[in-house]
Image (tube, grey):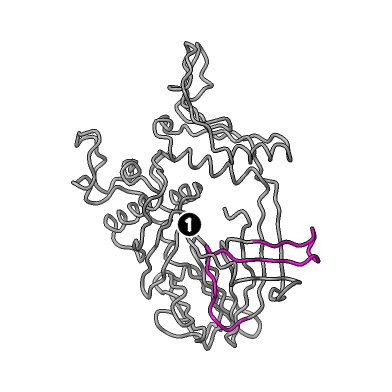
Amino acid sequence: MAWSVDVNGTDITAITQSIVWNPKLSRPASCVVRFPSHLFSASTGSNRLRLSNGGLLFSGPIWYQQQQGAEDAAYTELTAYDDLIYLGKRMCKTPADWPDNNFPIIPPDPAAEPGPCNLADPTKVILDFITAPEILAAFINATNDCDGPMPLSVGSVASGGDDMTGFPTDWPMDIDTFASILLTTGVLDIVVSPGYNSSTVNLWNGDYGTDRTGSVVVQYATGAFNARSANRTIDMDEVINALWYLLGPKDPWYTNDIQHWKGSLTPDGAHDIDTWRDPTGGSHPWHPWPAGLISRWNSSRSSYGYMQQIDIHDSKEDENKIRFLFERMYANEAKIRAVPRTFVSMGLDRTTGPPTFFVGDLITTTAGSTVGGGGFSGAQRVYGYELSIDTDGVAEYTSIDASADQE
C-alpha cells in the first residue's frame, strides 16, 4: 500500500511536493497538494482530486487553486473539499413529490401545504421527519430531486433519534446552515463516504465512531513516546452556568408589559407560560432538567461564580408552540458551557501506512509531567486531524484535534 493522489484519474503523485489531508467530523474534509506549475494544470470546480492508500480516503472538487511564482520556479497549490461542501450551495426545500401519500396533510387542507420544492417555508419537513438524521436526509434528497443531483447522495440514516421538531429560524436557509443548527443539539453526526465521482453522506444520532482507547494510545514524554508534540487548551471564554432561552412570541402578562415571552428554558426548568403560570395567579406543572445536569450547573457556580447569558428565539413569533428542538439545543449547550472547554492537539510520529483511526473515534492521549499541570491522560474524541505526506510517501500527523468532554 502506498499513498497516491490523482486529478480526474490522472495520477500526479510523482510530481507532488506535498500532500495535506484534513478530515473533520461533520464538516467538509480538505486535501491540499502542491507541485511545479509547468508539470500539470487543473480546472477549478470541474476537476476532482482524490487521495488513496489501499483504498479511497478522499474525493472532492477542486475548490480553490493558487499559482505562486518565485525567482527560480512557479508552483501550483490545489485545495479540494469533499462533497459535503455543496450543502452550502443548496437550499432547504420541501420534496419534489410533496404532498403525496407519504406525507400526510396536517391540517387536512391542500391549500395549507407548502407545495413541492418550496423554499419559502419548508417547516413541515421538520414536523414530519422528526429526528435530526431524517430531517437532514429529507432536505438533501429534496434538493437533489428539485434542483438536479449534486455529487452527494444520502447513504445510511440512523433511526430512533431524539425528537427535533421545532422552528429554528426564518426561511429560506441553505442546508449547511440548517445542518449547523442540528449539530448544536449533539444528536447528529455527519460522515462522508468518498466515491470516485460522487460521495454518500451517512447520518448518525451523534454517536458515530469506534472506541479505540485500547488500541490507539498517543503518548508524549511518557510511555511509548510516540508523539512529537502535545498541546492542551483550557478556555473559560464560553463558560455560562445560567443559560436562558426565551421563546417567542412576546407575551404581555400584565397591562403595558411586553417584556415576557410565551415560553422559557432556564436552569430551574422548561416553562411554558400557557401551562405554567397565567395572569390570574394559577400554577401548573412544569418539567425540570435531569439531576445530573442541575448538579453540573451548581458545581460550576461553586467553582466559577454565577455566569448568565440570555438567548432570545422569537423571529417567527411561534417558537414556543413546538419546543423539542429548542429544549434539546438548550440541554446540550448548557451542559457543554458549564465548564471550561478542554481541547488536546497531538503530533504523532511519522508513518507510511494508512490511518488506524478516524474522526469520531475515541483514542487515549497521554502527556508526561513535563507538560504544565502535571501532564494529562484520558479518552479523547477525535474531531479532526491533519496528515502531511512528503515526496517519499511518509505521512506525518501534524495535529490531532480532540476533546476530553467529547462534545
Q: Residue at x 60, y 80 (%)?
A: 395
| Picture coordinates of residue 24, whole percent (x, y) | 53, 63
| Picture coordinates of residue 335, whole percent (x, y) | 59, 44
Q: Give 8 or 76, whichever is nearer the viewer.
A: 8
- Label 1 Cα crowd, 10 Å radius (few <14 / some 14-19 / many 20+): some
Q: Amino acid at mark 1?
A: Asp
Q: Give 114 or 343, whichever is nearer the viewer.
A: 343
**Residue 168, above or below 285:** below
Give the extent of the magenta segment.
Answer: 351-378
| Residue 359 among magenta residues | yes
Q: Residue at x 47, y 38 (%)?
A: 326
Choose top left, top right, bottom left or bottom right for residue 367.
bottom right
| Picture coordinates of residue 155, whole percent (x, y) | 35, 63
* Residue where numbered disc 1 is placed: 207
Choose top left, top right, bottom left or bottom right for residue 361.
bottom right
> What number of labels is visible?
1
**Residue 36, above or below 46:** below
Q: Residue at x 50, y 11 (%)?
A: 255
In the rendered structure, the answer to whether residue 394 lies left or right of residue 10 reads right
| Residue 52 among magenta residues | no
What secondary structure is marked by label 1? Answer: loop
In the rendered structure, the answer to whether residue 74 lies left or right of residue 61 reads right
Q: Residue at x 59, y 41 (%)?
A: 292
| Picture coordinates of residue 16, whole percent (x, y) | 55, 83
Choose top left, top right, bottom left or bottom right for residue 241.
top right
